[in-house]
């Protein structure tokens, strides 16, 4: 691998991250007023109690000092202190991140796999009935908002048939062995993961289809066919490999987008991940938690883009030799 | 780290394997799931082991009795901890951790006799020293939701192991023993004030009817029956408060039977529940009101429109509003038209202003008093004072509170009809809160918001608009020495009849001054299943999510 390419991409990554972190901090701290005030109205605090809360939350310093404290703590892995839960933000985030990774990870794997498969099927029979059916169906599903698809599934599975749980990640208070527990989580996972898959598979099927259609008419494809290579091999090995670049880009962008989309899906299904945490933190003005969430989102997006940049090197000789 | 992953790792499964299993079973389990309806805990077990399942959309914040602020946390904490006295099913004071108590003739010293069989969840006995410690700590550090009631606290004295005498600087009409959750000294005694404030209290140890079992953040809180509680054992073997991010799904879960009761249901969904079999949609009075607040700050730095300092203008605005129409339109009928700041749910504490003396739905009277005070109608239909300054004000409302926004729009029209121009602006609650509470230089004219009582005693709601609360709760900067005096008198009036009289006078005075224009007292809309638990009592303030824990302790499995 080209070392200069790597270093350039890495330094871009560091600068982007620093700017994101600073903007992230500023965004919440320039909002007028103090979060303690609102807490005080509902919590019935007097002036002395308010002052001690302000100190506890670290809001008694100037903005610049708070910024440096924030940076210093972040470098040490401390993302601050949640106003609502009175726990370190890292602890609050920890549980939620695991749940979101489970949901988004499962959904993304299925989405990308099914999307590519559908795209390849459509492209290998371009302009046939199969192609039209796949394209129209995926476009229809893609144009529906996540939460709407979710609500339809909730209605179908939770109201009509009662076959699947429609809320949460596990049945509260269920006492079963670890396998039962695992099955319980898996049951709860089906509907939210299905929602994400239904809405987003179109992105991959359409990109794959279009990239494949372009590739399929190239001269070397004709050559391969003339040489008598089986159609299956041509489609899956020759064509897909060359159509993979836009798919890698789309996957990288998708990770960022799906984290945002998961906010809606998690809210609809009460899935206790980062989306729900953000929703509740906005409601409760828990700024340190919001900062932590957005930092993680930023890292996820920047990191996946970095990985896709590196993957280009591996996949495409033109990038490698440039 | 995720607790579930942690548990799996303890069984030798890595995070990656966990994810793989999750992904694989997502598909495989589809078939398993089809084999039968979703079972939830409590639905299948014998009646002695039945778990009561509560659904809400309001997550608890903390389970530390010194720091929690949310109503949801209050609900859970009040079942794990005891107060010396508690509210019974009629919201009357009754014995709690203290089986009896006496009040000294001067009303300043309260002596409580604790139950000798009361123990903490860790088995240690509850003693008078624990009570002294709790009151001392709460008062000294101004901690928690009950600190407001200990403003006049002087000291506590341990008389013997089970007797404690608490003394105040002044007589106490409201007994703080109803509000302060007693905590064990052997757990909290060694902590500093800031340690107490940042303690998440991960394993709460109280003396209440339920013990802490589990809090799965963002999902549910579970408690189990405390077999050694001093009172009559409740029927529910455990309680689960299930958190929903979505009121539609929550309501659906009640209809399908996976929860037993909902703490709050939005009006539209509540109407839909009325026809569901096995479900009772209950409408009860609440201890809350929504009001229009006028900036009556007399501070030189106030940037509010000074014309609002004229009581006539405020009364005219109040006259212009049709409150019955507000309730019908903004609340879909689920409430009562507002008048004084204590809702009718307060019973005999509520001052009933006769209909013909109310500032309500009388635009003709509004015009008349404005004309009499010299506000003439200008060329554009807006009245002006004698210097030609128009009656033109800014109105701010919280954008996410639909009923307030609607009320604001109705108010603008009503005010215009009597010659007063209002410009409506919607803001998010934090921004509005910070604008309204900017006591140094308030730059606003009129706002719409609401208050919930934190107690069925009138003291708290009356205390909001005291001069001493400017910079605190006082959201309109109202300052009237006569009102302050009436408040102070009622706070020390040990004779109930005398106190009721003072409380009525205070409400009447505040009503006449019209710094608040109380729009309505909204209903508490709840719903519960009638085929899982029986004996739910509909109480003013709510069957659950109220100041009393009585329904939790008395409902029986069906």
Image (cartoon, coloured by chain):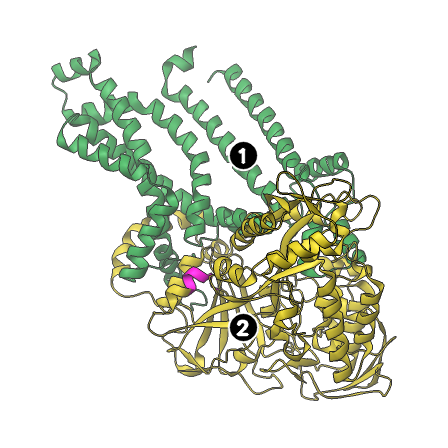
Residue nearer the viewer, A161 or A124:
A161
Q: Position of residue B390 (x, y in %)?
A: 70, 41
A160 sits left or right of B61 in the view: left
Specify the segment rendered in magenta: B265-270
Q: Residues within 10 Å of mark 2 (few under 14, many from 20)?
A: many
Q: How many marks?
A: 2
Chain painted green: A
Residue indicated by mark 2: B542
Q: Position of residue B19 (x, y in %)?
A: 40, 48
Residue A85 visible within the image: no
Q: Position of residue B480 (x, y in %)?
A: 82, 61
Please give the name of the residue rendered at 65% of the width and 76% of the height, measured from the top-left corner. B122
Q: CA distance from mark 2 to mark 1?
A: 46 Å
Residue indicated by mark 1: A299
Q: Is residue B425 above or below residue B119?
A: above
Residue B268: within the magenta? yes
Which chain is indicated by disc 1?
A: A
Q: Nearer the viewer, mark 2 or mark 1?
A: 2
Residue nearer the viewer, A279 or A113:
A279
């Amino acid at each position: 691998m080209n070392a200069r390419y790597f270093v350039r991409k890495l330094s871009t990554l560091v600068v982007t991250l620093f700017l994101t972190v600073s903007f992230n901090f500023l965004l919440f701290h320039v909002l007028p007023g103090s979060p303690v005030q609102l807490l005080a109205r509902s919590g019935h605090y007097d002036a002395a109690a308010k002052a001690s809360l302000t100190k506890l939350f670290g809001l008694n310093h100037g903005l610049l000092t708070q910024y440096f404290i924030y940076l210093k703590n972040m470098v040490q892995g401390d993302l601050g202190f949640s106003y609502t839960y009175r726990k370190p933000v890292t602890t609050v985030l920890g549980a939620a991140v695991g749940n979101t990774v489970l949901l988004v990870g499962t959904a993304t794997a299925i989405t990308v796999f099914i999307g590519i498969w559908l795209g390849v099927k459509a492209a290998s029979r371009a302009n046939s009935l199969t192609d039209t059916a796949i394209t129209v169906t995926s476009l229809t599903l893609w144009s529906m908002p996540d939460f709407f698809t979710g609500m339809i599934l909730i209605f179908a599975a939770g109201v009509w048939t009662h076959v699947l749980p429609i809320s949460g990640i596990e049945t509260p208070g269920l006492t079963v062995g670890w396998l039962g527990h695992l099955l319980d989580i898996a049951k709860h996972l089906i509907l939210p993961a299905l929602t994400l898959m239904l809405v987003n598979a179109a992105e991959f099927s359409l990109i794959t289809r279009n990239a494949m259609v372009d590739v399929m008419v190239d001269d070397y494809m004709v050559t391969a066919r003339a040489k008598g290579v089986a159609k299956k091999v041509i489609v899956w090995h020759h064509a897909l490999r060359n159509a993979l670049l836009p798919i890698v880009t789309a996957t990288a962008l998708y990770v960022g987008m799906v984290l945002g989309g998961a906010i809606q899906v998690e809210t609809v299904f009460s899935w206790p991940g980062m989306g729900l945490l953000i929703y509740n933190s906005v409601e409760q003005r828990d700024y340190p938690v919001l900062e932590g969430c957005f930092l993680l989102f930023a890292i996820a997006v920047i990191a996946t883009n970095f990985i896709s940049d590196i993957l280009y090197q591996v996949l495409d000789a033109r990038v490698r030799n440039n | 780290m995720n607790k579930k992953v942690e548990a799996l790792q303890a069984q030798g499964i890595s995070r990656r394997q966990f994810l793989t299993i999750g992904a694989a079973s997502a598909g495989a389990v589809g078939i398993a799931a089809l084999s039968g309806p979703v079972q939830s805990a409590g639905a299948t077990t014998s009646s002695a082991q039945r778990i009561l399942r509560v659904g809400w959309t309001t997550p608890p914040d903390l389970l530390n009795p010194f720091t929690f602020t949310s109503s949801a946390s209050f609900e859970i904490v009040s079942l794990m901890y005891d107060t010396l006295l508690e509210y019974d099913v009629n919201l009357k004071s009754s014995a709690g951790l203290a089986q009896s108590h006496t009040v000294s003739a001067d009303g300043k010293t309260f002596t409580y006799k604790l139950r000798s069989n009361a123990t903490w969840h860790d088995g240690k006995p509850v003693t008078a020293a624990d009570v002294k410690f709790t009151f001392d700590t709460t008062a000294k550090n101004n901690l928690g939701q009950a600190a407001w009631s200990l403003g006049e606290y002087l000291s506590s004295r341990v008389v013997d192991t089970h007797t404690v005498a608490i003394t105040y600087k002044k007589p106490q009409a409201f007994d703080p023993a109803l509000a302060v959750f007693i905590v064990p000294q052997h757990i909290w005694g060694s902590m500093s004030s800031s340690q107490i404030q940042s303690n998440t209290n991960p394993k709460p140890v109280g003396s209440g009817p339920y013990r802490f079992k589990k809090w799965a953040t963002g999902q549910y809180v579970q408690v189990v029956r405390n077999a050694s509680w001093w009172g009559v054992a409740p029927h529910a073997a455990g309680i689960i408060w299930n958190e929903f991010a979505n009121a539609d799904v929550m309501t659906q879960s009640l209809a399908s039977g996976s929860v037993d009761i909902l703490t709050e249901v939005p009006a539209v969904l509540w109407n839909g529940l009325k026809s569901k079999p096995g479900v009772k949609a209950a409408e009860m009075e609440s201890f809350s009101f929504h009001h229009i607040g006028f900036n009556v700050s007399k501070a030189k730095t106030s940037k509010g429109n000074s014309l609002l300092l004229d009581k006539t203008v405020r009364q005219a605005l109040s006259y212009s509003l049709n409150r019955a129409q507000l309730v019908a339109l903004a609340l879909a009928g689920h409430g009562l038209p507002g008048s004084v700041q204590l809702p009718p749910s307060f019973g005999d504490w509520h001052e009933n202003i006769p209909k013909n003396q109310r500032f309500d739905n009388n635009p003709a009277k509004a015009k008349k008093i404005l004309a009499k005070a010299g506000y003439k109608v200008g060329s554009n239909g807006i009245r002006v004072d004698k210097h030609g300054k128009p009656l033109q004000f800014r109105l701010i409302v919280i954008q996410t509170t639909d009923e307030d926004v609607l009320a604001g729009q109705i108010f603008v029209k009503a005010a215009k009809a009597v010659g007063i121009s209002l410009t409506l602006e919607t803001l998010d609650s934090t921004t509005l809160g910070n604008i309204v509470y900017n006591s140094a230089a308030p730059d606003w004219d009129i706002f719409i918001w609401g208050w919930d009582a934190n107690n069925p005693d009138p003291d708290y709601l009356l205390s909001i608009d005291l001069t001493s609360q400017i910079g605190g709760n006082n959201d309109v900067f109202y300052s009237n020495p006569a009102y302050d005096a009436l408040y102070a008198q009622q706070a020390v009036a040990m004779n109930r009849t005398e106190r009721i009289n003072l409380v009525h006078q205070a409400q009447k005075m505040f009503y006449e001054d019209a710094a608040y224009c109380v729009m309505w007292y909204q209903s508490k809309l709840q719903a519960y299943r009638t085929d899982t638990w029986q004996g739910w009592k509909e109480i003013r303030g709510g069957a659950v999510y109220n100041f009393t824990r009585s329904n939790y302790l008395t409902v029986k499995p069906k």
